Image (spheres, coloured by chain):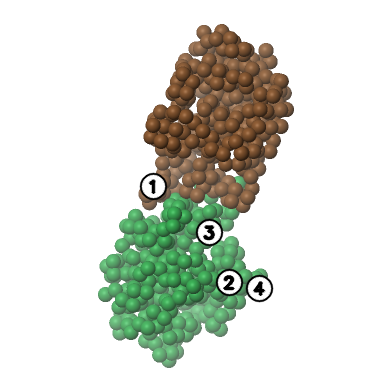
Chain colours: A brown, B green
Amino acid sequence: MRVTVLAGGVGAARFLDGLVRVLPPERVTVVGNVADDLDLLGLHVSPDLDTVLYTLAGVVEPERGWGRAGDTAHALGVVSQLGGPAWFYLSDRDLGLHLARSERLRAGEPLSAITLSLCTAFGVQVRLLPATDDRVRTVVSTPAGELDFQTYFVRRRHRDEVLAVRYEGATTAQPAPGVLDALAAADVVIVAPSNPFLSVDPILAVSGVRDAIAARSGPTVAVSPIVGGRAVKGPADRLLRTLAGESSPRAVAAHYDGLITHMLIDEADRELLPAIRALGLRAAAAPTLMPDAAARTRVAQAALELAGS
Amino acid sequence: MRVTVLAGGVGAARFLDGLVRVLPPERVTVVGNVADDLDLLGLHVSPDLDTVLYTLAGVVEPERGWGRAGDTAHALGVVSQLGGPAWFYLSDRDLGLHLARSERLRAGEPLSAITLSLCTAFGVQVRLLPATDDRVRTVVSTPAGELDFQTYFVRRRHRDEVLAVRYEGATTAQPAPGVLDALAAADVVIVAPSNPFLSVDPILAVSGVRDAIAARSGPTVAVSPIVGGRAVKGPADRLLRTLAGESSPRAVAAHYDGLITHMLIDEADRELLPAIRALGLRAAAAPTLMPDAAARTRVAQAALELAGS
């Protein structure tokens, strides 16, 4: 069985950590969000790709879910001491990756090729593809004006109300090599439990990606990032309330209307199963919190079982 | 008394560490070599300026004489693991400085302004000026062809025979703000014990610098980097043999002909005093090795005493 997963950051990475305990990792392709990539201190940083990479490599900081475990941040300490931009956390080993990747990007190598070789270097057997090698950037409209994604998310700690989201460059961006094939050839496509507006939509917005999923005959399963009305992590609940009228797995299902065939929601939301099925989807409820490997494995198993139903 | 010092790396930094124990540091201006600056991993690195900065800030690695003491190199470890260029040692805190400086250079700030603010941030009261804000690069001719300075010096460990040296960009480079004034206004100019060809000449090659020194009426003292025929550090002895026919303080004195008025040599070379005086210079011999603060202070004191003779 071949599975392709649309993935944002921490939630997706934890789900994938479970999936590779259920499936041989070489059967898994990940299409990762790159619209929250940023240029910082002359470095190209790809937070979502790196969260997936570090998690699958077993070097992620486990509590936070992103960044490298047990790392120092001596370089950033000096940047800060010298008055440089230190609002985006970069630990020293993480910085090493950004330095090496940025060097190769400057030399003209595409992000997708670099990402595959990073996977090899980190012993990650999953095929991790950026949605695109082109530049796509999430821009968030707030009462304070338009903000680039990381200014909104990290610098201002996603406190601003989000009035609208757009994905600069997406319509002209081409899917990275392998993305469309991985969607067409997959037995199952899974939309990971990621923020629909900030992680998944910017993947879908890349030209051809949404159509490639909609054209599939096989199952496309979404795992709800909303549990009991709240986001497990981040501002997905607030965005759903503002942009979709309600924060619930049903709102997530409706958001993916025409795209997904199956929806896995948390047990806490079991009473929403009929409403989701009323949208024409197959749906199931299971525990979806993923604190440890066992829980992650069960969520991945539940998603695959639902896909096969 | 105001003193201006032409400075390369480790030898100059150690001499300056003594000088600021003899004179109030705010009386001292350092004109630093930037022709061995390099662009590495997208960063602008200024090895000689940083050696002076770190030494005067008291954070230099004391045995080696360059780089930061007690630092980690986790970022470079990852760069190396990922196949990136890791031949030039960059520790994590050092990297922080390069990141912050490179960011400001990209924003259009001149190196001289950045360097002064780095001095402030590190509590260094000496006025440290790059010889120029423009790009000058030492290029070394060897039997293996022309090499950029750091490829010759670090990557190939200065093993190649040096047939000639040129300073790309020097003739059109303008002295950084303050450089010519500091040379004109100094009561004493000191040429630190640095490599004549690789550290001092690229400063002198910047348009107007040599003339500003030659035009002085006050003393200009060189401290010999050669002791008993050998360089205290680095390849100065080999370059002198190839390019000046002999490795000795006399060859150094002759190399600076028309530029210096006084020469301080090591006690081990005392028998060369008459030959140096025959060049029309005042000269003295003293212990010039600088393992510790006391020794550095004595060398600085000896240079100032000679200047006053």
From the viewer's perspective, tell me whether residue A233 is left or right of residue A54.
left
- For badge 2, the amino acid type reads Val
**Which part of the image, by quadrant, shows the N terminus of chain B?**
bottom left
User: Marks 2 and 1: same chain?
Assistant: no
Compare marks 4 and 3 and give the one earlier in the sequence: 3
From the viewer's perspective, tell me whether residue A104 is left or right of residue B265.
right
Report if residue B2 is visible in the image. Answer: yes
Callout 3: SS: strand
Residue at coordinates 58% horizontally, 16% vertically from top-left? Answer: A264
Compare marks 2 and 3 and give the one earlier in the sequence: 3
Residue at coordinates 64% horizontally, 17% vertically from top-left? Answer: A261
**Which part of the image, by quadrant, shows the C terminus of chain B?**
bottom left
Determine which of the numbered discs, if any, sits on residue A80 in the image.
1
Callout 2: SS: strand
Residue on which disc 4 sits:
B143
Tally of numbered tags: 4
Q: Are marks 4 and 3 in contact (CB under 8 Å)?
A: no
